[in-house]
Image (cartoon, rainbow, N blue to C red):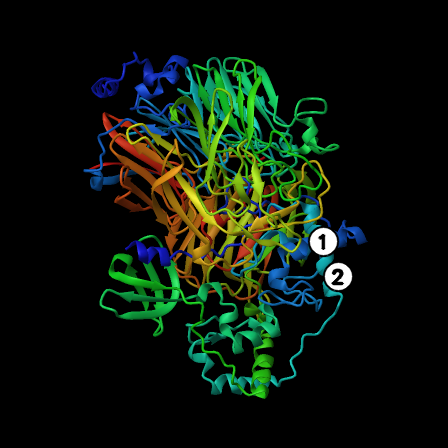
Amino acid sequence: MKHGLIIAAVIAIGGAPQPPAANGLPVTYERLLKATAEPGNWLMYSGDYRGHHYSSLAQITADNVHRLRARWIYQMHRQKVETTPIVVDGVMYVTRPPSDVIALDAETGRALWTYEHKVAARVYTCCGEVNRGLSILGTTLFLTTLDAQLVALDARAGRVLWKKELADAALNYTATGAPLAVKDKVIVGIAGAEGGIRGFLDAYDAKTGQRAWRFWTVPSPGEPGSETWKGDSWKYGGASTWLTGSYDPELNLLYWGTGNPGPDYNGDVRPGDNLYSCSLLALDPDTGTLKWHFQFTPHDTRDWDATQVPVLLDSTIDGRARKLVVMPSRNGFYYALDRQTGEFLFAKPFVKQTWAREIDKRGRPVLNPDQEPTSEGNESIWPGVDGGHNWMSPSYNPNTRLLYFSAREERRRFFKTDAPEFQPGEAFFGGGGGGGARFRPEESWGKLIAMTPETGEIKWEHRILAPPWAGVLSTAGNLVFCATPSGNFYALDARTGKELWRFNGGDRVFASPITFLSRGKQMITIPIGDVLIAFGLD
Amino acid sequence: MRTVWLIACCWISCIVWASAQGGGARQPRPLPANLPETNPYSSAADLAIGRKLFIGRCGQCHGQNGEGGRGAVLNTGRFRYGGSDRELFVTIRNGIANTEMPGAFNLPEIEIWRMVGFVQQLGRQGATEQSSGDAAAGADVYQKNACSTCHTIGGQGGFLGPDLTDVGAKRALRYIRESIVDPSADISLDYRPVEVIDRTGKSVTGVHLNEDEYSIHLRDLSGNLRSFMKTDLKEIKLPRQSLMPAYASLPAGDLENLVAYLGMLRPDRKESPSQARPDMELWTFDRLENIGGHKTTVLGHPRVIDSPVGKAVEFNGIEDALFIDSHPLAGAETFTWEAIFRPDGGEREQRWFHLSELDPETGADTDNRMLFEIRVVGDKWFLDSYNQSGAANKALMNRAALHPLGAWYHVASVYDGKEFSNYVDGVREGAADLHLAPHRQGHASVGVRINKAFYFKGAVHLARFTRRALSPSEFLKRSSP
């Protein structure tokens, strides 16, 4: 009966219905390719391969959103819930820190099964024991774990099909991101660039767990890019891949961001650009071959990972049709690149930034003086260590043709210590970047930006009290949903930025909202504090 | 409306150190297994690096040479939370609850040790921080200037300004002096002034308590808690001036006397033992002869083991136990008692952690007690948490909440002054309303009930005693084996 409703809803919205098996499984690769044709489901981390985090559902609209009410709450009893669920035909698959999976009835929020992963005793994480979500292919869910494993679970019962160690957790390799299923493979990133790892991106055979390829994000001596490191520094050079990338099936290219070089704040031991840290990589998903790369912040010393969601869109720039990949970077500039060639098109600051005079024609920053971490602490640097933007999802809305994303305006203090010796299994910072000084309100706030992606022009912005950690969802109901660190989940008119609705969830938000259909009715969920809350029209 | 909120953004106060994947709550990791007593990294080169680390991370509050400031003085050799290498390691690593001192949770151990080494070096300066003033006369100055209208000492006074009960331990004398003469130079984070002006032009001034995008909350000058919707306000001002008047014209003698008086306000000089206690006490079960700095009596042959969560003491369920010369929650009106342990089966009823009050006259155990117990059911167990003070008592037992034996668990008993609740791995299992009067001094047993009955089979890794009700998110983190 439930399936019938979902099919009816899908047909009503105009998508091509897929014959569902039990609980809408299997989720084939063909269905993932056409994920937007199933707006009642949320089939992957960003909702689709293009990183749009957008839904064509339009039951909840700018006109009726004032009737949105909390419908259920799922208690996680865990800190820092950063997960984005997957929804397939009324079943929500959601992760819970550190590395658990729960299948929930999307209508009621009641748990159907729970998989608890026993994390190895010794795991080092820089930033909390978090997990950001799952991927699904066929009837299998793919989970990365804090102790750097890839786990395949049967979506119907939460049973383990296979486990694969990505790398040694005792050496500070850890995994927090949602994998991405492409064709018959699962693409998986790694974290730990604060712990002296050498980063990579992996692909595994979805059926067997056999590793199909590995791309090292720090080249070894002799490989292209190795000239950008000195001595042994490449061995623990960081450049992790901890957030989910995007995929263009036509070009058959995978787009994946990389993190900071290590040690974070003292670059003296690693003179050079430190490729491929703080970069966007375009890779062949079948072989892991690098097609092109673009480095946002060469020789980073402020922890400005480029692990943001790459957003793919097709448009015209300067009269020329372009396949674009765009990204608001942690370094405070918004970038547009040609995703076929990697050609740099333009960059524009979207928050106050003090470190670069400009981004030159090749896409390289022209540096300002005195913007490096110092021994006594440099308090003059904008944006802060957490960047102008970060891992929280942006949203591209094809109706308004605007890109929406959370932005963080802040000044922070950066300092460096003597270059740390690398010690296996120990943290590897070489300094710090944080508060220290007590910054005034005018030195730290947040906003949601609506941007014309072809120009970087800010159409409107919605200011909030403090720099946010919440992602954005935009919908065909002309709505944009986001949340504030003070716990307010809110909806804006996607065209004007006018606030239409809000809900005080009572705790900080470190996650992105999603939407789906349950029994034919549109619902919206977001983790707030340590709970997952679902909203629907009353 | 927008103009209101452009002005009234929140003040960022938290000290966040490293943040590759995003800020937010920092979680303490369990203390490293085999944490040595003495600093393994104390060469001259280590100290030189430790100095740089200290300057980058600590100097802003504690002074570049440990001379103190907003943070405690570190060059006298007296450390409020213990001055052994190991104690300093724990303080730097975990921070100090209810103070502005953050923990360095994600720093490498070697870097913490290097800072410990440098802090010890600072302490060896043996500086004495002395005021030329007369503390007794300073108490009169305090009185004469009606400081107690806004400040509290030992529970007496107003609450518009910071509590000064232990200001001498927290702040350097020069910082205290500066705060009297120029209170706006550095305003305590919890006492930032705010002024709101409503649409009719009426203004209310007070201490900023909370704020979000839509509302703002303050304690006004009369002590009333006030809440305002921003839509009703014309303006919100966050002045850089403290609410405290500047006593710049205080005669120099009076000022020094007042500084001397405030500087001697240190809880460890108080006579009441319950007030002298730190807010938090950590017991690591990594040896037998001394737990949490207290002498033990060993029964049977408990042994120190290496486990996936670190060192632990293992008990055989027949005759093994440790008696510890302390009741760490004596005098506590509210508390959180946490432990990380592994039950291994055995007898059905096991009383594995017992805090018992002693009659000060007779030295005998009274009936007042706090207990962690378990019941073993097949290959599972459930928790029983018991609390008694006078006629009030309650056992919290959730027979349905069964957990597999042989694994490591975090358990907690929490009392917030009204409600007693218990948790396993952060999940609440039971709660009851209860009025518990604080216990008097006493002692503790681990591995058995205080009367040597109901022995425990399993192991205990850590215990922490906090003199307030913690929320589950503040609980000790158990590294999952």
Q: Pick whichever, B362 or A297, lies toward us.
A: A297
Instruction: Check disc 1 and give the amino acid type.
Output: Gly
* Residue B256 on image: x %, y %: 60, 83
For image coordinates 69% across by 37% down, the residue present is A270
Q: Earlier in the sequence, mark 1 or mark 2?
A: 1
Q: Residue furthest right?
A: B44
Q: Is residue B257 left or right of residue A269?
A: left
* Residue B434 on image: x %, y %: 39, 58
Chain that bears disc 2: B
Image quadrant in which you'd find residue A211: top right
Can you tell which of label 1 and label 2 is closer to the viewer?
1
Give the alpha-carbon distance from disc 1 to disc 2, as whole Å.
10 Å
- Residue position marked by numbered label 2 in the rendering: B121
Q: Are marks 1 and 2 in contact (CB under 8 Å)?
A: yes
Instruction: Check disc 2 and give the amino acid type.
Output: Gln
- Residue position marked by numbered label 1 in the rendering: B50
Give above or below for A298 relative to B25: above
